[in-house]
Amino acid sequence: MPSPTTLASFNALVASLARSGRSAQALCTFCDMLGRGFTPDHFTLPPVIRSCAITGSAALASSSHALSVKIGAHGNLFVGSALVLCYASLSNLPDARRLFDGMRHRDSVLWTSMLSAYAQGGKPEEALRFFGRMVVAEVQLDAVVMVSLLLACGQLGWRRHGRSVHACCIRMFLGMPLSLGNALVDMYVKCGELAFAEQVFSMMPRRDVISWSTLIVGHGLSGRSDVALRLFDEMGIEGVEQNSVTFLGALSACAHSGMVDKAYAIFEQMKQQGIKPELKHYSCMADALGRAGRVIEAVNLIEEMPCKPDEAMLGGVLAACRVHGEMDAAERISKRLMGMSPAKSGYYMSLANIYSDAGRYGDAERIRGFMKEVKVDKLPGYSSVELDISISESQFV
């Protein structure tokens, strides 16, 4: 391909590469453009900034931001929107919000993007407060806004507000867009309302792998293993291809019901379909083995798997060791956990309790004494409850 010779041709090439998913090539072309002495404009920067976000390069994003300020393009709506989205995708929400607040002109896309950034960035309270500002600003609400609100409600477990958003969706949309249906199912699952989740699922005109997987995971984590596995089989019958999340839900269902042989069969089916097991899948297998009393098999699985175990996986096996009285395995797992998090009191207390259960009170006291010696305190427990927030239900409806 001949090299572009004008700014317009460079802009077209950079935008084309960015749209086609070749973000790294788009950035290389942009660097080539700068090296040839061309000064970018507000048409050049949006695809470049989007490419920075896709490649995860915070340094290039900051450089592009500085360049936009230098050439006076940062006030352009499209450049500013791209920067807000870029910082949000890089989990830099404070800078994204500062850019948003500093923009003179904001369209509905920019408002929605900032709301989505809060919801997808694990900041549900900020998302709902920001939505209150959107209502005051009379921003047009669309399906993307509703999806972000449902995500925030699900993260917080706020069923009442989630139902209000659902009612608003029924009034606003004649049909149920697939993304919105999936968001509703996910919200009800996270709030523990599986009956409502099933109702929404059954009324969706079209369902994809996300729809099925969300419901399967929800039933599996709620202990309704028979329903989760039935849905898993129905999904295959309907010709919907399972993904790693689907298999995670099925394995979780097996773990909660102690169906080790079924878990092994699903694990093998997963590999046969070309899906590489991840740590979370191995964790489910170890959990299934531990719950069924096959603790030694679980420990062997941890030692033989290709990835390193995390604290959650080891902690689950340690709990199984206590239930089934596997002292040697408990000591091995505890040492690994204490090495990973020496300041976490729960692992010391678990081993001390295991010693106490086995009648080894001297060893239990030795562990508690060691905790005092290294100044590891037992952390207090806490719970969360749903309270009214500053956003009233009338703002949803």
Image (cartoon, grey):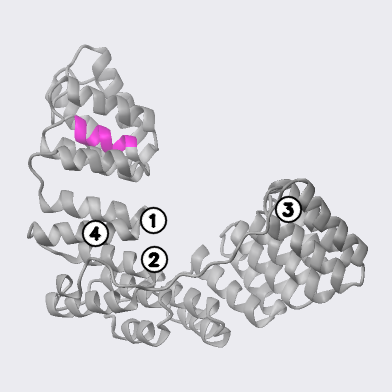
Q: Are marks 2 and 1 in contact (CB under 8 Å)?
A: yes
Relative to 212, does residue 377 appear above or below in the rendering? Answer: above
Residue 155 falls inside the magenta stretch:
no
Mark 4 residue element:
helix
Which residue is under mark 4?
129
Mark 2 residue element:
helix
Q: Amino acid at mark 4?
A: Arg
Q: What is the crowding at mark 3: few (fewer than 14 residues within 10 Å), some, or many (at least 20)?
A: many
Q: The magenta stretch spans which residues?
A: 45-52
Horizontal and vertical percent position of residue 116: 27, 55
Residue 46 falls inside the magenta stretch:
yes
Q: Nearer the viewer, residue 16 or 131?
A: 131
Determine the CA span between mark 3 and mark 1. Answer: 27 Å
Determine the CA span between mark 3 and mark 4. Answer: 39 Å
Determine the CA span between mark 2 and mark 3. Answer: 28 Å
Which residue is under mark 2?
155
From the viewer's perspective, tell me whether residue 131 is left or right of residue 388.
left
Q: Are marks 2 and 3 in contact (CB under 8 Å)?
A: no
From the viewer's perspective, tell me whether residue 389 is left or right of residue 318.
left
Q: Amino acid at mark 1?
A: Gly
Q: Earlier in the sequence, mark 2 or mark 3?
A: 2
Q: Amino acid at mark 3?
A: Leu
Determine the CA span between mark 4 and mark 1. Answer: 14 Å
Q: Nearer the viewer, mark 4 or mark 1?
A: 4
Q: Which image quarter is the N terminus in? A: top left
